[in-house]
Image: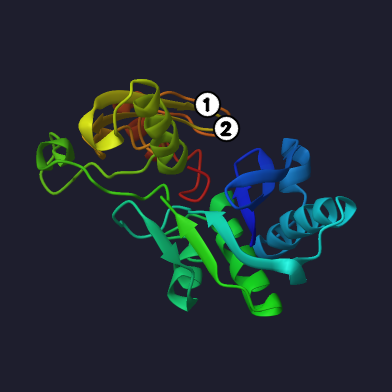
Amino acid sequence: MKILVINLGATSSKAAVYEAGKELFLTNILHSMEELHKPGTAEEQMKFRRNVILRELTEAGYDLKDFSAVISRGGPLKPVESGTYLIDEEVVKDAGNPLVGGRHASCLGLIIAHELSKTYGLPAYFADPVSVDELKAPARLTGVKGMCRLSMFHALNQKAMARKAAAMLGKTYEKINLIGVHMGGGVSIAAHEKGRVTDNFNNMDEGSFCMDRPGTIPATQLIDLCYSGKMEKREL
């Protein structure tokens, strides 16, 4: 039972083949900013990423007709509990909606997985998307009425590494508390409390600056910039 795994990040495209829990193939294609921004539309970007993955699989001697399922890293969708989900039309709709997914690369992975599902008759899944929301109520509070903090972090990697750390300690993830740190094209820090992430930096709004996100910036200076007339809302 071969499973194709797709992981599209802000600066890379990763694909792997697993069978019976064993990794048979892994490729990690790094992209330059010029390469990523060359395609003009989200549709062209999706095709570019898909073709990169299919080329690597073909060169490695794999035929998608021989696969039993495909799973993609989950993007910034509507808030969900941690877990594994089937990719359906509603998920694809959210992934393509800039007001929900923001057109992050991981959302393109969901769309690619769904396309391959329809083409080859494979079930397509995603697991632990970045919009996993397990925040405690106090973690949502801000100092502004009507404005709440949102959960948005690298849940897939954070959860996987937390489980590995628990195993190294001879315990289960649901029995330990730890701090998880993801450092890639984006950066996120999360508090894991007995199997749930009860607080985290929303890496689209808060935390450390990184390759393609400004992180937390001075609020008063941002307000001044918004009213300066120097930049349109889309640019901001």
Residue at 43% x, 39% y is 154
**At label 2, which amino acid type do we have?**
Gly
Residue 175 image-quadrant placement: top left
Question: Could you classify mark 1 by the number of other residues whose Cα lies within 10 Å: few (under 14), some (14-19), or many (20 or more)?
Answer: some
Q: Position of residue 97 (x, y in %)?
A: 47, 65
Q: Which residue is pictured at 70% across the width and 78% down the height?
A: 119
**Count of labels shown?**
2
Query: Dot 1 corresponds to which residue?
Result: 210
Tag 1: amino acid: Cys
| Residue pointed to by mark 2 | 185
* Viewer-side label of 2, 1: 2
At horizontal 31% and vertical 56% (from top left) the residue drawn is 79
Graded by Cα atoms within 10 Å as few (under 14), some (14 to 19) or many (20 or more), the crowding at tag 2 reads: some
Q: Nearer the viewer, residue 73 or 141?
A: 73
Q: In this rendering, is residue 171 above or below 132?
A: above
The alpha-carbon separation of the residues under discs 2 and 1 comes to 6 Å
Q: Residue 20 or 152: which is nearer the viewer? A: 20
Query: Could you tell whether 198 is left or right of 235 in the image?
Result: left
Give x and y (percent) for residue 65.
76, 72
